[in-house]
Image: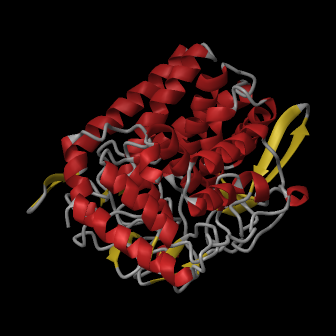
Amino acid sequence: MNRRTFAQSFSLLTASVFLKQYSFAGAAPAFPVVRPAADKRRFRSRSVEAAIAEFKKKVKDPELGWLFENCFPNTLDTTVTYTTAQGRPDTYVITGDIDAMWLRDSSAQVWPYLQFIDKDTELRQLVAGVINRQTRYVIKDPYANAFYGDENKVGEWKTDKTQMQPGVHERKWEIDSLCYPIRLAYFYWKKTNDTKPFDAQWQQAVKTTLQTFREQQRKTSLGPYHFQRETANSTDTQPMKGYGYPIQPVGLICSAFRPSDDATLYSFLVPSNFFAVVSLRQASEMMTAVAKDTKTAQELTALASEVETALRKYAVVKHPKHGDIYAYEVDGFGSQVLMDDANVPSLVSLPYLGAMPTSDSIYQNTRKFLLSTENPFFFKGKAGEGIGGPHVGQDMIWPIAIVTRGLTSTDDAEIRACVQSLKATHGGTGYMHESFNKDDPSKFSRSWFAWANTIFGEFLWKVYQEKPQLLA
C-alpha cells in the first residue's frame, strides 16, 4: 500500500470508528473529564498548562484537544515524586501501573518537557532531579533496567539468577538503559547551560557506562553479567547459562534484552548499538566541556567509532525485495533477525534518536520493509495498522510505534494518517495504551502507561508547531 492509499484508508477508518463511538443530535460530542483533578496531580508546570491551553484554543478538532490535555501532562499528573536530597533536586518517576523507575522510561517520559525548561524553573528542577536519581542508579548497578524508590525494597524478581540486590526491581541488561540518561543529560545541558547535575558522581556514572559497554563487547570473556529466570516465557530469560547464544566479537555491544524488556535472540541489537554511538559522542562532548576530562572523552569517541564501523560491516543485509536494509539483531557470524519491535530504540525510530537522517538510503529501504507485512511484527486489521512485538503478542499494535512512524516521516499524508489512527484507537478512554488489538481498540493492554501518553503529546505538539494544517 502506498502512503496516499494508507492515509485515505485511515481517514475512512477514523470516520467509521468515530461515528460508532459518538451519536450526533445536532451537537458536538461530549468528552468526559478523565484527567486527574488539579488537587490530585503530582506536579504542575505552568508552561505545560499554557501549551495545553494554546493547543485547545488553536486546534479546532475537540477530540484532539481532549486527548492532548489528557496525555501530554500525564507523566507530571500521575508518575513523578519530586523532593530534594542533600540540597539537590531528586525525582522518582514510575512508569504508570508499575511502581518502579526504568532508566529508559523515566528519560522518555520527561523528554518532551525539555523544550520548556529554559523558561520554567520548577520544571527544570524536576528534570534535574531525574538526572540526579538516574546517576545514583547507574552507579548502583549499570546492568539493571529498573529500580525502586526505596533502596532497601526487595521486589518480586528477587529469585532471578543474576546479581540482584535490594532496591533493584529488575536486572535485565539493555544497552538503551545507559543511553537514555545520557540523552536526557545532554539536551538538558544544551537547553539550560546548567552544569550542576554533572558533578563527580555523574562523571563516574559516565565512566561506569563506558566500562559496561566495553565489557559487553565480550572481546576477551563473556563478562560479569548473566541472567536467567524460572518462567514459562522464553522472552523473560536467556539460554546458555544466562549469557545468550554465542556471538563473534566484532566490536558491537551485546544486549541481553530489548527495550521491550524481552530477551534478544542474537545479542547484537542493532538499533540499540546505533543509539550507543550517539550517546557515546554526546557523553564525550560533555566530558570535554564540563568535566575537562579529555582522556575519558577520547575513549568514549573511540568506542563510538568502533561500534559505528562494526555496524556498517555487520548490521546491513541484502533483502531480496528491498535491497540493503538494517537487520534488527545479528551475531557477528552471519546470522540475523529481520523485524522491528515497537519500543524505542527501534529501527524505525533511528532518526528520532539522532542516529541518522531520514534520507539515509538504507534507512529508507529498511523503513519500507518494516512498515509492511513482510515484517513479522507489523499487524494490519480493521482498527489500524502498525508495529507490535513479542512482548504483548500477536495482532497487538503499539501506539508508541505509530507515534515514532509519524515523528520520523517527511510525508504529510503519512503524518496525518498517524494522527488520525491514534485518535481512533484510544478505545474511548482518552489515553494511549501499551498496545491495542488490530481489529478492536477496546481490547488493549496497560490502561496507565505514561510513556505512551507523553510521547503522543510530544507528537501532537510537534505537528501543531510545524504543520498545524495536518490537525484540521
Q: Position of residue 318 (x, y in %)?
A: 12, 55
Task: Say which residue appears at 17% left-offset and 54% top-offset.
Answer: 317
Q: What's the image's color scheme?
A: secondary structure
- Image point (63%, 67%), residue name: 431
Q: Quadrant of the N terminus?
A: bottom left
Which residue is drawn at the image coordinates 70% and 21% (left, top)?
Answer: 195
Quarter of image, res 413: bottom left
Q: Is residue 186 above or below residue 31?
A: above
Query: What residue appears at the point 26 percent right and 55 percent down from the top-left corner?
Result: 367
Q: Is residue 222 left or right of residue 307?
A: right
Horizontally, residue 234 falls left or right of residue 178, namely: left
Q: Residue 276: horizontal and vertical position, in percent?
A: 44, 41
Name the outermost residue toward the front: 26
Q: Quadrant of residue 199?
A: top right
Q: Position of residue 208 (x, y in %)?
A: 60, 37
* Residue 65 seen from this side: yes
